Amino acid sequence: MDTSEVLAFLISLGTLYSIYVILSTSMELVYGELGLPDFAKAAFFAIGAFAVGALTTRLGAALSGIAWEGEFKLHSYYYATLVSAKVAANPLLGLTLFLVPLTVAVPLAMFLGVIASYPALRLREDYLAITLIAFSEIIRVIARNYEPLVGGTFGAGVVDVFAWLRSPLRELSMMLLSATFAAGAWLLEHRLSTSPFGRLLRAIRDDEVAAAAYGKDVARARAWAMALGSGMAAAAGVLYAFYMGSVNSDDFTVSRTFLVVLMVNVGGRGNPKGPLLGTAVYLAFDRTVLFAKRLLLVPFDVNYLSYIVLGALLVLFVMRKPGGLAPERPPLTVNQKEVKEAIGKRSNPERA
């Protein structure tokens, strides 16, 4: 493996890491801070990707003056190539084709996240988990069977919005863009976790009845948390679609949600550092298994080896280190004595 191949691998890994950090951070906000089992995460992730698959090629062809002929499911890859050639000569077109699906997917996912938060008021956690899994599968099955959306089982091609750059600058730009979104999502979650809103979410997680008794609006807090988490997941889906270069509904099964849950639990639920550590551990194991399974001779399909290893890893952490690599820590707050001293100094400057 020469230097260029190593560089391409590291750039690809960095892009995927950034996308999964956004996704696991969105799960940390809802599952770690609020305690809500958001098992519809794959659906919100898919909404972002489906917006890219459904809009970029059609919109790009319309803006470029390319006449569309034939069914979408059969020709989306061909027209995605034609539009990418137009983007190579017009960077502004690439920027437009990136921003449009992003501005469609994020508000839509936030709205659906608010809708999905209301069953949490009436259902127990186990029934809520089943309901959210069903919701996730409904979104995927609709996309799989309604072919004009993203091509059904054929999938849909995605325009290369960085076609105006040469390789490896094209891939490096995608990584930097994903890393920027990941940093923004993580900083937002970290800021929220130390804010009064974050303390309210943890209060609801620990004792919902007590939080409501203190006059806190539990329904509104849950709706906001679900909206923010769903919007983050949709943004990750948009980046993932551009990273992959195509969209297929079968890539967004419930197993995707469980992988994100694994990242949060391994990294540390309730700690903003958890998504960073958990994602790194997951990708390290996943890439290692990906290369190792080609060399192994085992009496079963090696494609299931990754799930076996990751499942064993999750069981190991639950038994031996339930708090994850970065367990939750008490929030940093000023104690009552320091507050009284500060008030006293302000009211009596001579004591300062």
Image (cartoon, rainbow, N blue to C red):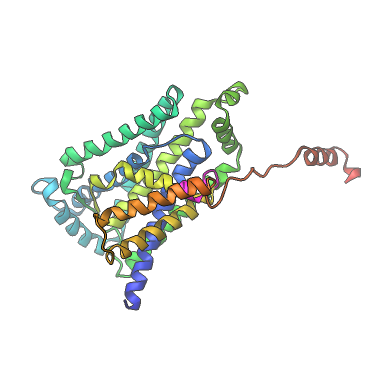
User: Could you tell me which residue is drawn at 64 percent across and 43 percent down?
Assistant: 330
Q: At which x and y percent is residue 201?
A: 55, 34
Segment colored magenta? 263-271
Using residue 266 as the reference point, say whether residue 258 is left or right of it.
Answer: left
Q: At which x and y percent is residue 285?
A: 39, 59
User: Could you tell me which residue is drawn at 16 percent across and 41 percent down?
Assistant: 147
Q: At which x and y percent is residue 234?
A: 36, 44
User: Could you tell me which residue is drawn at 88 percent across and 46 percent down?
Assistant: 352
Residue 150 found in image quarter: top left
Q: Residue furthest left?
A: 70
Q: Residue furthest right?
A: 350
User: Could you tell me which residue is drawn at 45 percent across and 57 percent down?
Assistant: 281
Q: At which x and y percent is residue 33?
A: 53, 39
Q: Is residue 178 visible?
A: no
Residue 254 found in image quarter: top left
Q: Is residue 351 above or below residue 117?
A: below
Q: Is residue 145 above or below residue 157?
A: above
Q: Is residue 338 above or below residue 124?
A: below
Q: Is residue 297 visible?
A: yes
* 269 is within the stretch colored magenta: yes
Q: Is residue 202 above or below residue 58?
A: above
* 4 is within the stretch colored magenta: no
Using residue 299 as the reference point, say whether residue 173 is left or right of it.
Answer: right
